[in-house]
Amino acid sequence: MLYPHFYSNLVEGWFDKFLPWRKVSPELLTDVVLIAPSKDYVASLDGGKIPKRQDFQRFRGRDKKRIQRWTHAVDRSEELGEQFINWASSGDIAAHVKPI
């Protein structure tokens, strides 16, 4: 299964995803290829993280700043798509696959 995700860590269960001990069992990931940005990439975004829905509350009254951060993340995401296409079309994508 090809699984594009926001982060390289996976948490089993949606409602308790913030509990640090919740991890996905490796046995469930034997046929999963996870595509996710690196920690360095995420850290390089405005605020050091990927924008999320809660930003509407966090930036209440500061819509310009919220929109700026979201637009920056969208613009930067093109880098990820281009890199994936380059690796896939070069035939060298397996060199960039790491075990979870």
Image (tube, grey):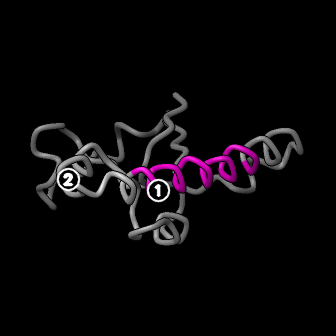
Q: Which mark is residue 19?
A: none
Kindly identify the residue that appears in the image at 22 percent across and 54 percent down. 61
Question: Per the image, is 74 magenta?
Answer: yes
Near mark 2 (Cα within 10 A), the count class, few <14, some 14-19 or many ≥20, is few
Q: Is residue 56 above or below residue 19?
A: above
Residue 93 spot, x, y in % from top left: 76, 47
Q: Quadrant of residue 18?
A: bottom left
Taking depth in this image into account, of 69 and 19 the one nearest to the observer is 69
Q: Which residue is mark 1?
A: 68
Q: Residue at position x 49%, y 34% from top?
A: 3
Amino acid tagged 1: Gln
* Vertical comparison of 74 with 59: above or below: above
Which element type, helix, strand or loop, lies under badge 2?
Answer: loop
91 to the left or right of 96: right
Q: Position of residue 25 (x, y in %)?
A: 28, 46
- Say what secondary structure mark 1 lies in: helix
Q: Is residue 70 magenta?
A: yes
Disc 2 target residue = 60
Please tell me which residue lies in front, 66 or 40. 66
Q: Earlier in the sequence, mark 2 or mark 1?
A: 2
Picture coordinates of residue 92, whole percent (x, y): 83, 49
Say which residue appears at 48% left-offset and 64% top-offset. Answer: 42
Which residue corresponds to the image point at 65% horizontal and 50% vertical from the top-left? Answer: 80
Query: Mark 2 near mark 1, Cβ–Cβ under 8 Å?
Result: no
| Above or below, comparing residue 79 to residue 40 in the picture | above
Query: Which segment is the magenta one?
Result: 67-83
Q: Position of residue 13 (x, y in %)?
A: 17, 37
- Amino acid type assigned to the residue bearing label 2 in the image: Arg
Q: Nearer the viewer, residue 44 or 7?
A: 44
User: What secondary structure prevails in the magenta region?
Assistant: helix
Which sits in the foreground, 38 or 75?
75
Where residue 91 sits, quadrant-wise, is top right
